[in-house]
Image (spheres, grey):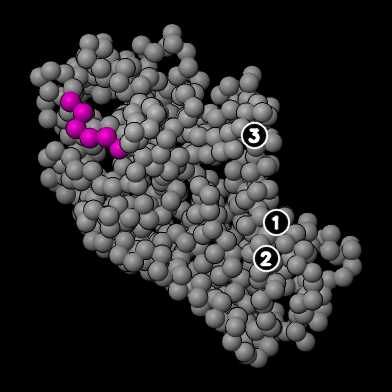
């Protein structure tokens, strides 16, 4: 008999399914780093089965409730790090921490609620329901990453540790395509007790996971050797906590920490030195201005021919408008007169509530302030494009939050016709303390390297800084943990040929979505039995 002939009607059973829905979300969340409990991926399959058990005549509210509850469980665990930034100024903002985590989880969970509703409305009785479930939830995750400002944190496809064999499929289909594949593989085992066809579908899910590992192993086996002529990189991690940046008494010592590490002797002189986002707590015009002691100190730490990349805020205008503030990346070279700025990139994708305040008038009335204490917040710059560097390979800058978004580097290449040879990701993970946030951020950012086939150099003030190769891997000795004070010196890893994702973007993902919905629309025999 088909599953729709056994709908859940008992209030006790309905309550039990809702508890299980929350558990399903929590299980899926702990599959993500830093936990990496991959059996937790079956939480997606558990949600699939719970929505099925509602029956085809269930009210849409019941399906929405299950999806929303599962999403709440998932996002409360995944964005728990969001409480940490409120502790930087605990006296003024600490009270908001639990409310922020819960409210953010409840809002993001609505995407899952809508996905469960659409699935329940469209699901037929055949095994193609597995594809439909994967399609609607993957599409909901794509929407989460694009609507309003977008927030693609911890996509299901990014649960695989970056650099592992399964993560390599992102080079073909991107993180969203890998999300669809992951959801199919997670839901398929829950058809194992539904007759012969269900068992074949379950085995197909197992085969899909085996295929991810096989493809990834083959791709990693073909990794090129290091280029002896590659530029030498130095990442500077000065271990400056976020709260210390607001103490003017510590300003000189912060500058000294960065200058000392920049000038540290090495057996091979670095060609490129990278400081993190917001390294020096002042405007670029102030500490790089003519006559500033900080300008002279930084210039004195650099040797002829070196390039310094750093992050900071600057003042400017957009057209004929009023003065605005940008969160920027600047490229500097030492010259006879001190320092010369040879390039500037202004951050395009800003953090809501962190770098600008949505619904500012309402938020101010409630006493909610943005985290960044720079005027009225930042103004976005133009879309990302590769930067040409004097005598060095072109680079695609990504500042902090921008590393969450698949396709930024590809879009810059399409706009200019210039392919970057590497990605530099400066970030200020000091906001997240030493908890799960920096480790998750590193994993997510590393997927941008896999998708594009480009190495990534990642610098943060407190960790985790790392040199990431084009396969998303961090080699031993090429990372600095939370709380480390030091540098990483290593050659720039080689870039790979353009990946399939680099050439076609999310085309494969949308073909997967089309397959999911086409399968639901076609007539077919009932395939699930109990």
> Helix, strand or loop at disc 1?
helix
Categorize mark 3 by other alpha carbons within 10 Å: few (<14), some (14-19), many (20+). Answer: few
Between 482 and 95, the one lying in front of the other is: 95
| Residue 72 visible to the viewer | yes
Find out whether the residues at labels 1 and 2 contact each other: C-beta distance under 8 Å: yes
Establish if 251 lies above or below 87. above
- The residue depicted at 41 percent of the width and 46 percent of the height is 403
Residue 3 position by quadrant: bottom right
Residue of label 3: 362
> Helix, strand or loop at disc 3?
helix
- The residue depicted at 30 percent of the width and 30 percent of the height is 310
| Residue 231 visible to the viewer | no
What is the CA distance from the residue labelled 1 to the residue labelled 2? Answer: 8 Å
Residue 523 position by quadrant: bottom right
User: Magenta segment, which residues?
Assistant: 340-345
What is the CA distance from the residue labelled 3 to the residue labelled 2? Answer: 32 Å
Which secondary structure type mostly characterizes the magenta part of the structure?
A: strand
Q: Which mark is residue 116?
A: 2
């Amino acid at each position: 008999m088909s599953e729709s002939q056994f709908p859940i009607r008992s209030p006790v059973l309905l309550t039990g399914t809702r508890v299980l829905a929350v558990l399903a979300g929590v299980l899926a969340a702990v599959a993500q780093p830093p936990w990496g409990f991959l059996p937790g991926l079956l939480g997606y399959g558990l949600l699939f089965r719970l929505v099925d058990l509602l029956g085809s005549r269930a009210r849409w509210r019941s399906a929405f409730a299950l999806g929303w509850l599962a999403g709440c469980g998932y996002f409360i665990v995944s964005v728990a790090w969001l409480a940490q930034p409120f502790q930087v100024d605990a006296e003024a903002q600490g009270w908001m921490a639990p409310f922020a985590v819960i409210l953010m989880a409840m809002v993001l969970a609505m995407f899952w609620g809508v996905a469960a509703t659409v699935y329940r409305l469209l699901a037929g009785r055949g095994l193609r329901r597995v594809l439909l479930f994967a399609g609607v939830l993957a599409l909901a995750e794509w929407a989460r990453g694009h609507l309003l400002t977008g927030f693609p944190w911890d996509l299901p496809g990014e649960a695989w540790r970056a650099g592992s064999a399964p993560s390599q499929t992102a080079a073909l289909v991107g993180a969203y395509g890998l999300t669809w594949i992951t959801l199919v593989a997670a839901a398929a085992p829950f058809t194992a007790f539904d007759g012969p066809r269900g068992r074949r579908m379950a085995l197909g899910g197992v085969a899909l996971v085996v295929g991810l590992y096989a493809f990834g192993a083959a791709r990693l086996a073909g990794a090129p050797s290091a280029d002896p002529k590659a530029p030498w990189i130095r990442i500077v991690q000065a271990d400056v906590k976020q709260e210390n940046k607001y103490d003017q008494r510590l300003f000189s010592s912060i500058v000294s920490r960065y200058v000392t590490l920049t000038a540290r002797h090495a057996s091979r002189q670095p060609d490129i030195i990278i400081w993190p986002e917001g390294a020096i707590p002042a405007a670029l015009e102030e500490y790089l201005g003519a006559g500033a002691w900080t300008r002279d100190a930084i210039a004195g730490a650099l040797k002829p021919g070196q390039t310094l990349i750093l992050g900071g805020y600057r003042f400017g205008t957009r057209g004929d408008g009023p003065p605005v503030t940008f969160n920027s990346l600047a490229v500097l070279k030492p010259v006879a007169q001190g320092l010369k700025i040879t390039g500037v990139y202004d951050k395009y994708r800003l953090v809501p509530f962190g770098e600008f305040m949505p619904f500012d008038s309402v938020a101010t009335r409630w006493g909610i302030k943005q985290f960044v204490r720079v005027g009225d917040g930042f103004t976005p710059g133009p879309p990302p494009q590769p930067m040409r560097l004097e005598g060095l390979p072109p680079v695609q800058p990504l500042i902090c939050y921008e590393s969450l978004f698949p396709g930024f580097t590809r879009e810059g290449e399409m706009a200019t016709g210039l392919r970057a040879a590497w990605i530099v990701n400066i970030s200020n993970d000091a906001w997240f303390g030493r908890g799960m946030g920096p480790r998750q951020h590193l994993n997510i950012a590393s997927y941008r390297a896999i998708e594009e086939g480009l190495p990534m150099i990642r610098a943060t003030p407190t960790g985790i800084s790392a040199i990431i190769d084009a396969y998303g891997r961090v080699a031993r000795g090429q990372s600095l943990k939370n709380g480390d004070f030091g540098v990483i010196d290593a050659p720039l890893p080689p870039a790979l040929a353009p990946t399939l994702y680099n050439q076609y973007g999310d085309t494969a993902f949308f073909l997967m979505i089309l397959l999911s919905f086409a399968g639901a629309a076609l007539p077919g025999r009932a395939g699930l039995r109990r």
